Image (spheres, helix red, strand yellow):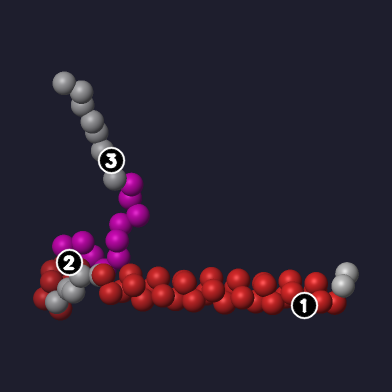
Amino acid sequence: MNTSTKINKEIKQLVTNTVRQTFLNEFIKFRFLILPYVSSQEQHDIEKRYGKRPSRKAVKSFSFEI
């Protein structure tokens, strides 16, 4: 394999990984920006009602045709 081709592939891989990681980081920041604010009182109420951890139980839904 030609050394310039090998170097080009390495550069392409490096750029691809860098862009992917940058998009991932920016997406995480964006998700935090759009999360609604929850006051400590609201958070306490949520934890009191539902516990500290969300349930892993599946939600059952039913549909009826009339």
Res 13 quadrant in image: bottom right
* Residue that badge 1 annotates: 7
Residue 30, percent across and down? 34, 72
29 left or right of 34 in image? right
Query: What amino acid is found at the position of numbered circle 3 in the picture?
Result: Lys
Magenta part, dominant SS: loop
The residue tagged 2 is 46
- Residue 57 in percent (x, y) is at 33, 50
Q: Which mark is residue 60?
A: 3
Residue type indicated by callout 2: Ile
Question: Going by the picture, which residue comes out furthest to the right?
Answer: 1
Nearest to N terminus: mark 1 or mark 2: 1
Looking at the rendering, which quadrant does residue 4 occupy?
bottom right
Label 3 sits on a secondary structure element that is loop
Local secondary structure at mark 2: helix
- Which stretch appears magenta? 49-58
Q: Nearer the viewer, residue 7 or 63?
A: 7
Instruction: Tell me, yes or no, if residue 44 can be seen here.
Output: no
Indicate the quadrant containing the C terminus: top left, top right, bottom left or bottom right.
top left
- At a point 87% along the width and 72% down the height, the residue shown is 2
The residue at the far front in this view is 4
Q: Residue at position x 57%, y 77% from top?
A: 18
Asked if the residue under mark 1 is in contact with the one under mark 3, i.e. CB atoms within 8 Å, the reply is no
Q: At 41% from the left edge and 75% from the top edge, which residue is drawn?
A: 26
Q: Confirm or deny contact between disc 1 and disc 2 (CB under 8 A).
A: no
Q: Residue flagged by tag 1: what amino acid is it?
A: Ile
- Crowd class of label 3 (few under 14; some 14 to 19; many from 20; radius 10 Å): few
Is 56 in front, or is 21? 21
Q: Is residue 42 visible?
A: yes
